Every structure is written in structure tokens, then in C-alpha cells.
Amino acid sequence: MDTKSLPSLFNDPGHYVKAFKVFCARSAKFRTYSDWVDGVFSEPVVGKLQATVDGREELRVLGVGSGSGEMDCAMLEKLKRRFPRINNRVVEPSCELLGQYKALAQSKAHELQGVECDFRQQKLEQYEKAGDATKFHFISAVHCMYHLDDYDSSLEYLYNCLIPGGAILVIHLSENSGLCRYRERFPCFQPSDHNYSTSADIRSSLDRRGIPYTQHPYPVRLDITKCFDQASEEGGLLVDFLTNVLNYRKTAPEDMQRTVMECLGSSLCSESKNDGIYLNMDWDAIVISKPQH
Ligand SMILES: C[S@@+](CC[C@H](N)C(=O)[O-])C[C@H]1O[C@@H](n2cnc3c(N)ncnc32)[C@H](O)[C@@H]1O
């Protein structure tokens, strides 16, 4: 399928933000994060750290590709209940997102009392190159491994940044998700600066190195019902987000539109229930632990 002549969504940052907002709302992105932190996070992460880290010690945390910080702040609030003093270093290249993270942390100053933040506007690769020797008790990389130059070597680097007894949380799209299947079917829509690794790739990188981990699958659905309503502006924005094409409905040839929508709506990618169509975006939380000895 020839998509080269189609205008990229990334050429219009304002339109991208609108499309991203629809995606966040229709996938309940941030509610999913807080539900996950409330439900799953405690046992494999907080429990593990508690068993190996002295609670009187300052907990050193590293957030990689933290974006606007919703997930990180939710995790920090949970960690704070067990570890009253936390040093939270954040490595995030986007100035805009880092600004949003700072504002969010500021608005949660009361809940995050005892958390000292150290924001670095950098890519992980730049941070690594700078050669800081700090070791961390807990490192998180939530939906950001797709953006790294070489996730395999970055994983090894992050593992080396852990103290013995520490843990890394990687959240990554499952290889069984409908979104992965859609991307496999239409690689032409994917930007070249992303690697479309799946949770299976992360696990095989760890297996090859004999690094222990546990995996915690989590179901996530994106309501794409409106994508099938030609009159819906919201649906149009969501289609733009999924194809990375600006005004897809106006710019893509009709047969291309049909093929893509057929795939998105099919049981390969989505499930239909209660008059709605839901794209499967299941992710896996992979908790990597570094043995103490
Ligand atoms: C899909 S967003 C995820 C943001 C946040 N963790 C969340 O789940 O809401 C990916 C994040 O990775 C960041 N990123 C991109 N390239 C990166 C790199 N080389 N090193 C670290 N972070 C990177 C982006 O700026 C963005 O904030």
C-alpha cells in the first residue's frame, strides 16, 4: 500500500494534540494507569522493594520517558506510603511534556511530600552517554521502549543502573493485541523513528541475558465505534491517530480507507459488544528484578 504521498499527522502538531486527546479519552488512558497502580502495582513492585530495601533509606527512583507524569505520580504516591523519602529522577526529552509533569507534581505537592524531583530533559541515550553512576532501587519505563534507538541495549543499561534487590517496570504492548496485529498488517502507516517491538521482544531480550522477571497482562480497550461514523469529527481524529495521516478520510483513496477500516473492525483486531467496537490494546507489565546476591 503506497502511503508516501499522504500528509503526515506529525506535520500538524495542533491536529496531533487533538487526535491524541481523543485517543486518551476513548482508551481511558490515565484511568487505566491509576486502576493498574491501585490494583496490580502493590504486590509485584512495592511488595518486592519492601522485602529488599530498608524502609528508612531514601528510595532512589528513575522514570524513563515519563511523559506528562500521570503514571509516575500515581506510582510515587503508592511508594511513598512505604518509603517516606524518595529521590525521583526523570529522564524525558520532551520539554512540553516535562513542563506538564512539573505542573502535575506541583499540584500534588501535598500527596508527594517527601519526594524530591530531579528533572532531566534528555533522551535515555544522552543520559547514558553522560555517564552518571547513580544506582536506583526502582526504574520505570512505561510505553517508551518503542522510542529508543536500541531497546535491547537500553534494557541492559537500565539493568546495570539497578542496585541488587531493585526492580524495573516495563509496560509494553502485548504481541497478542489487536493494535499489534493492525500494525503488522499496515507497517506503511508507522513512523520510521518508532520500533514496533512487542512485549515478546522485551521478554526475549531478558531471556537471552538470563535476567529474571514476572509478567502481568492487563486488558485495555479503545472505543473505536465513532471511527465507523463518517459524520463524526471525533471518529475522524481517531482514524488520523491510528493511521498517522492528517485528515485521513479526506486524503486517503477510498479503497485504502475501506481496507484499513475492515481490518480495524474485524475480529483480528477488535471485539464488538453492546453496539460498540473496541480495539484490543492489551499491554503487559514486565517486572524485572535484580537478585540480591
Ligand atoms: C507514548 S509516550 C509515554 C509517556 C508516559 N510514560 C505515558 O505512558 O503516559 C513515550 C514517551 O517517551 C519519550 N521518549 C521518546 N524518545 C525517548 C528517548 N530516546 N529516551 C527517553 N524517552 C523518550 C517521549 O517523549 C514520550 O514522553
Image (tube, rainbow, N blue to C red):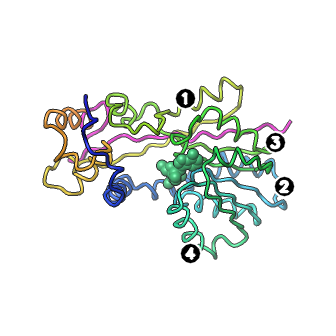
In this rendering, the label closer to the viewer, 3 or 2: 3
Q: Is residue 85 left or right of residue 253?
A: right
Task: Give the magenta range.
Answer: 265-293
Q: Is residue 195 left or right of residue 14?
A: right
Residue 107 is labelled as 4
In this rendering, the label closer to the viewer, 3 or 1: 1
- Residues packed near mark 2 inside 10 Å, few (<14), some (14 to 19) or many (20 plus): few
Q: Name the residue tied to disc 1.
A: 201
Q: Residue 275: within the magenta?
A: yes
User: At label 2, which amino acid type do we have?
Assistant: Asp
The tag earlier along the polypeptide, 3 or 1, is 3
**Quadrant of residue 72 within the rendered picture:** bottom right
Q: Residue 178: within the magenta?
A: no
Question: What secondary structure is found at the residue carrying circle 4?
Answer: helix
Quadrant position of the C terminus in the picture:
top right
The tag earlier along the polypeptide, 1 or 4, is 4
Question: What secondary structure is found at the residue carrying circle 1?
Answer: helix
User: At label 1, which amino acid type do we have?
Assistant: Asp
Question: What secondary structure is found at the residue carrying circle 3?
Answer: strand
Q: CA distance from mark 1 to mark 2?
A: 33 Å
In this rendering, the label closer to the viewer, 1 or 2: 1
Q: Nearer the viewer, residue 210 or 88?
A: 88
In this rendering, the label closer to the viewer, 4 or 2: 4
Residue 164 is labelled as 3
Q: CA distance from mark 4 to mark 3?
A: 34 Å
